Amino acid sequence: MKQLADPVAIVGVLCHEVAHAWRDYQKLAGDDRAIEEQLTDLTTVYLGFGILSANVSYRYRSAAKEWSHHQTGYLPVESMCFLLATQAMICGIPPKKLACWLETTQRASFLRAYDAVDFEELLVQLGLPPPDDWPPVRELVVDPID
């Protein structure tokens, strides 16, 4: 398995496998393998691995006179970036704050998706109430390590 020699690829594989385990634990896994693999990619975003999953979904590298590109996963990079953009929008994360963590191709796709999504329509499609009706966000408290 070539991915074991590539730290970025192995992180992507692990994100995907954690999502499989979570889907199994939650009794969400389906019988159709092709659909289940796509839903598992989607679940990586839900679980908070969206940046990692998007970045590993397509990789372009160039050095001197050589170049390579590689796609992994079951959803195309554009879909992964769209999912990440909708999650960022719902969570109120400014796009530039998240985009800086994405590879060049993913950054462009993410920003296009973010600009293209209509927030009000997204709420309707997801069956969410207006933001004023959402429960307050709990503040994350992190104790400093001495």
Image (spheres, rainbow, N blue to C red):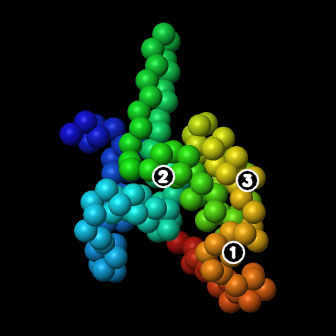
* Local crowd size for mark 3, using a 10 Å CA cut-off: few (<14), some (14–19), many (≥20): few
Residue at the (33%, 38%) spot, across then down: 6
- Which quadrant, please, contains the N terminus? top left
Residue furthest out toward the top: 65
Residue type at mark 1 is Leu
State which mark lies toward you, 3 or 2.
3
- The residue beneath circle 3 is 116
Residue type at mark 3 is Ala
Residue situated in front as seen by the camera: 7 or 87: 87
The disc, 1 or 2, on the residue closer to the chain's N-terminal end is 2
Can you say whether 145 is above or below 16 in the image?
below
Q: Position of residue 37 (x, y in %)?
A: 34, 58
Q: State whether residue 35 appears in this view.
A: yes
Q: CA distance from mark 1 to mark 3?
A: 14 Å
Q: Position of residue 57 (x, y in %)?
A: 45, 44
- The residue beneath circle 1 is 123
- The residue beneath circle 2 is 52
Residue type at mark 2 is Leu
Residue at the (67%, 51%) spot, across then down: 113
Residue situated in front as seen by the camera: 145 or 133: 133
